[in-house]
Image (cartoon, helix red, strand yellow):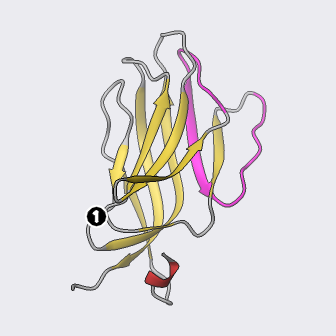
Amino acid sequence: MAEMIPDQQGRIVVVEAAPAGPGVDWTHTLPLRVRWRLRTIQATLVAGPDVVDRIPELTITQNGHEIIRITVSQSLAANLTFIYGWMEGERALAVTGQTSRVTALPRQLHLNNQAIIACVTVGLTLTDQWNDVIISAEEWMEPLA
């Protein structure tokens, strides 16, 4: 996909994914006529009282095909709140007692228009809630055909 990105730098965009209801994973579809170089994603998971480990997995789908799935290294137990992050480059180390964790995204991850960025949470319950899903990327506009 790199050959489709112009030589000059794109503009930096920061978007908030549409809020998902309780017990529903979040998702974001790239707008028409754009290309993105994904930089960071941050989202907060508030776990309900059900005793089960929640394990978020970031998925990216392009043209109906899953092209990447990144499983976080920190599960979430009942009645806790945790900030999950995915960042281009190296993974940050977690400190005991921390309430956030960063997982690496591949470098130079370019997405075509209509790519779907989503979270699939293993063990998500009806009382769990995703909040404050923020995505940052470098963006280029596609010319009209």
Q: How many marks?
A: 1
Magenta stretch, overall SS: loop
User: At 54% from the left edge and 57% from the top edge, which residue is drawn?
Assistant: 40
Q: Is residue 76 magenta?
A: yes
- Position of residue 25 measured from the top left corner of the image (x, y, whole percent): 39, 34
Residue 75 shown left or right of residue 4 in the figure: right
Foreground pick, 66 / 6: 66
- Position of residue 98 measured from the top left corner of the image (x, y, whole percent): 70, 32
Question: In which quadrant of the rendered view does residue 11 lie?
Answer: bottom left
Question: In which quadrant of the rendered view does residue 96 lie?
Answer: top right
Instruction: Write down the residue under mark 1.
Output: 31
**32 is higher (above) or lower (below) than 53:** below
- Position of residue 137 measured from the top left corner of the image (x, y, whole percent): 47, 65
Foreground pick, 23 / 132: 23
Q: Quadrant of the C terminus?
A: bottom left
- Position of residue 73 measured from the top left corner of the image (x, y, whole percent): 67, 36
User: At 39% from the left edge and 72% from the top edge, which residue is drawn?
Assistant: 35
Query: Which residue reaches farthest bottom?
Result: 7
Classify mark 1: residues with Cα within 10 Å, few (<14), some (14-19) or many (20+).
some
| Amino acid type, mark 1 | Pro
Residue 19 shown left or right of residue 134 in the figure: left
Q: Is residue 84 magenta?
A: yes
User: At 34% from the left edge and 54% from the top edge, which residue is drawn?
Assistant: 64
Dot 1 lies on which element?
Answer: loop
Query: Which residue reaches farthest front?
Result: 65
> What span is colored magenta in the figure?
74-96
